[in-house]
Amino acid sequence: MTATYNIILLILCAVGLAWSAAKSPAKTRQALRVGGRQFLNVLPFLLAVFVLIGVLEVFVPARMITLLMGNARGVLAPLFASLIGGVMSGPPAASYPMAQFLLRQHAGLGAVATFLIAWVAVGSISLPVEIKLLGARFAWTRWGLTLIFSILCGVLIGWLL
Amino acid sequence: MKTRQWLISNWLVVIIAALFLGLAVYDAAGAGRALVIGAQTMFGIAVILLTVFIFMGLFNVWVKEESIARHLGEESGLKGLLYGTLIGTIFHGPQVSIFPFLRSMQDKGARRGVLVAIVSAFSIKIPMIPLELALMGAKFTVVHNALLFLTAPILAVIMDALLLDR
């Protein structure tokens, strides 16, 4: 299954690159440079998340994650998830392995969805930049709204699936 | 200076590294096992990661948000929100880079609700979809992204109402 999926992706990627190269070799080279640079930027974060997954798996009993984010927690599970996701927030590529890990440790689906949304949307770390550029009122209102919405969406996804 | 900036923007990396080193001193065997599990997880999605970053590069070069952004100044109402949502969806780049972009949109006369639509829809990452499909399943991916797309304009309307008296 995974192998087939990987092959499909690689083919899609090759088609995309070939199309791009046919239209403009210079732009294609630039695309590869941009992709490579983004990868290098994200790499430390990705490595850290993989280490964190290993550490959590070995040192934190699965029961604890179930206890914090399991379905039995009800609405509290997405609330925890939104706070954790909102503070951790990093490159989105790193959020999916983390989310998959949480699911495997029996975190509730709604909580995991909340975690994923909060990771990219809430942006607690970038708040200072946002305040500077768009004003405190805008920034805080947006922050609060997205936090609430990440929880609502997560609960909704958990309920839909 | 540059190192300091890097450390600040990657604070989580620093904390995880410190945590791991502490654990390695406390329980070397456990830390080793943790590394193996981490490496396995990483190699499990290495191919997908590779393609994701190539897609990201292609996206970056061939999709220009400016071409859609041109419509924002004069459009208002629902159409403006829809454009905002679309821009957010195709916007690429790190989180922090979106705020200067929003500022320039605001200076060009875009409404605040439209700005919120852009940031909210920014959570949708088209190049990341292969990764999400592989790790979270098709059903989750579809529902998650559709919901994000639908809530962006709703959030924008609420935000407009909340900030109306200015």
Image (cartoon, rainbow, N blue to C red):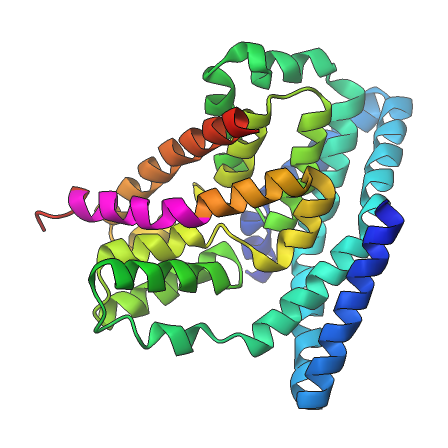
In which quadrant of the rendered view does residue A21 lie? bottom right
Side (left or right) of A74 relative to A109: left
The residue depicted at 37 percent of the width and 39 percent of the height is: A146
> Is A74 rendered above or below residue B164?
above
Q: Nearer the viewer, residue A30 or B138?
A: B138
Q: Main secondary structure of the magenta part?
A: helix
> Is A103 rendered above or below residue B65?
above
In which quadrant of the rendered view does residue B155 lie? top left
> Is residue A147 among what the camera can see?
yes
Residue A81 belongs to magenta span:
no
Residue B153 belongs to magenta span:
yes
Q: Nearer the viewer, residue B95 or A72?
A: A72
* Quarter of the figure with the N terminus of chain B: bottom right
> Is B6 rendered above or below residue A96?
below
Q: Residue A20 in the image: x percent, y percent?
A: 69, 82
Question: What range of the chain is rendered magenta?
Answer: B149-161
Q: Nearer the viewer, residue B135 or A11?
A: A11
The residue depicted at 18 percent of the width and 42 percent of the height is: B162
> Is B134 rendered above or below residue A102?
below
